[in-house]
Image (cartoon, rainbow, N blue to C red):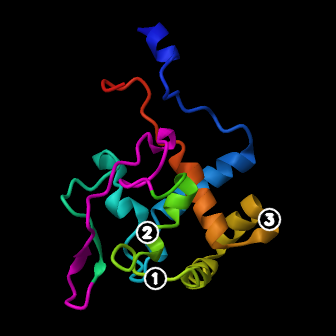
Amino acid sequence: GAAARRFSPIQPVREPATHLEAARIYLGYLLYHDGRLSTTNKVSCASCHDLTRGGTDNLAKSEGVPGADGLPQLGGVNAPTNLNAAGNIRQFWDGRAADLKEQAGGPPLNPVEMGYATAEDWNAIAAKLAQDSRLTALFAYVFGDLGITADTITAAIAAFEQTLVTPDSAFD
């Protein structure tokens, strides 16, 4: 009942405390659905973590950017749900990321998933996003002079993903 929910580790989503926090979450939502984080401009976080399918793609192995044969490359595992992931002790199936921000930085730099491979590739991603005046203005509002960087992109995505909770579900 209500007493058990009060002590459960997953709590209801709280309203953003400020307009700035709400803008950061909205920016994260936009980036989560933005294929420009991939080399093909088509694969987004939502491609594998579809919020209409429980935060996953329901595939045995998730599909990334096309390989040399033109077919989507397959990851080694399926995409874990990102619903309630904010409550996880570690991120990814193998726990290699400490938090949602670190996790958000992994797929763009995975040659199979989103196609980029090195930390310097964040510059190419940032340059693509900077061509969008709406996104540039939103980054300036949320992050000020920091601009569009790997750090600000992943911070925004993590802020959005922290809202992906399912309080009072049958599982809970």
In this rendering, the answer to whether 65 lies above or below 81 is: below
Q: Earlier in the sequence, mark 1 or mark 3?
A: 1
List the residue tagged with mark 2. 107
Distance from the alpha carbon under mark 1 to that under mark 3 = 28 Å
Give percent across and percent down for residue 92: 40, 55
The answer to whether 60 appears left or right of 155 in the picture is left
In this rendering, the answer to whether 135 lies above or below 103 is: below
Q: Earlier in the sequence, mark 2 or mark 3?
A: 2
Whether residue 17 is visible to the viewer of this picture, yes or no, is yes
The answer to whether 23 appears left or right of 43 in the picture is right
Mark on residue 117?
1
Magenta residues, as a range?
A: 67-95
Mark on residue 144?
3
Give percent across and percent down for residue 23: 67, 52
* Disc 3, SS: helix
Give percent across and percent down for residue 91: 45, 52
The answer to whether 155 appears left or right of 161 in the picture is right
Q: Amino acid at mark 3?
A: Gly
By secondary structure, the bulk of the magenta-drawn segment is best described as loop
